[in-house]
Amino acid sequence: MAKERKLQLHRQENFEMIEMEARRERVKMNVALLKKEEEEKRSTGGGLRQSKNIGKDGSPDLNSFIQQFPGASFDNKGTGNKEVSDTKDGVDTKDRSTEPSGSGESFKPGTWQPPT
């Protein structure tokens, strides 16, 4: 009985070893395939984005950034440098009250408290 049990354990160990070796081979094949795909992407330039390296001597291209905003420019003569007014809805913000306005039966002016 003990010999049969040892033989059975030996067969299980051999089977597990064969399974592990097959798994190792599959992993090796997958790694090789992934490396090949990555090398193909590198050679065609796809998948990887080229980034600009801005060092101490370089500076970012702000002209292309500014062009995204209509009427904006670097020069002071452009249309983008208009005088900014302090009015909102035709009312000068300096004349506005900081007191809230509202309506409804629960509204009480001057009673607002910040949340704690």
Image (cartoon, helix red, strand yellow):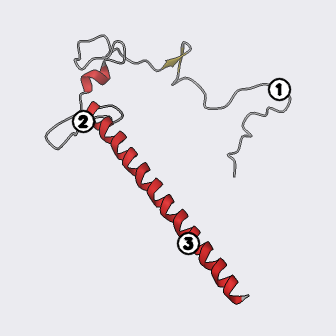
Q: Position of residue 64 (x, y in %)?
A: 28, 22
Secondary structure of the residue carrying tag 2 is: loop
| 105 with respect to 75 (left or right) | right
The N terminus sits in image quarter: bottom right
Kind of residue sitting beneath label 3: Asn
Q: Nearer the viewer, mark 3 or mark 1?
A: 3
Residue visible at 29% across and 37% down in the picture: 42
- List the single residue furthest toward the bottom: 2
- Return the mark for residue 14: 3
Q: Position of residue 97 (x, y in %)?
A: 61, 28
Question: Quick one: label 1 or label 2, which is nearer the N terminus?
Answer: 2
- Identify which residue, 3 or 26, lies in the foreground: 3
Secondary structure of the residue carrying tag 1 is: loop
Q: Which residue is mark 2?
A: 52
Determine the CA span between mark 2 and mark 3: 55 Å
Q: Quadrant of residue 13?
A: bottom right
Q: Which residue is mark 1?
A: 104
Q: In the picture shown, does residue 96 fall above or below 20? A: above
- List the single residue furthest toward the top: 79
Kind of residue sitting beneath label 2: Lys
Determine the CA span between mark 3 and mark 1: 83 Å
Residue visible at 23% across and 17% down in the picture: 76
- Tell me whether circle 1 and circle 2 mark residues in contact (CB < 8 Å): no
Determine the CA span between mark 1 and mark 2: 57 Å
Residue visible at 54% across and 12% down in the picture: 90
Question: Quick one: label 2 or label 3, which is nearer the N terminus?
Answer: 3
Secondary structure of the residue carrying tag 3 is: helix
| 114 with respect to 34 (left or right) | right
- Tell me whether circle 2 and circle 3 mark residues in contact (CB < 8 Å): no
Kind of residue sitting beneath label 1: Gly
Question: Quick one: label 3 or label 1, which is nearer the N terminus?
Answer: 3
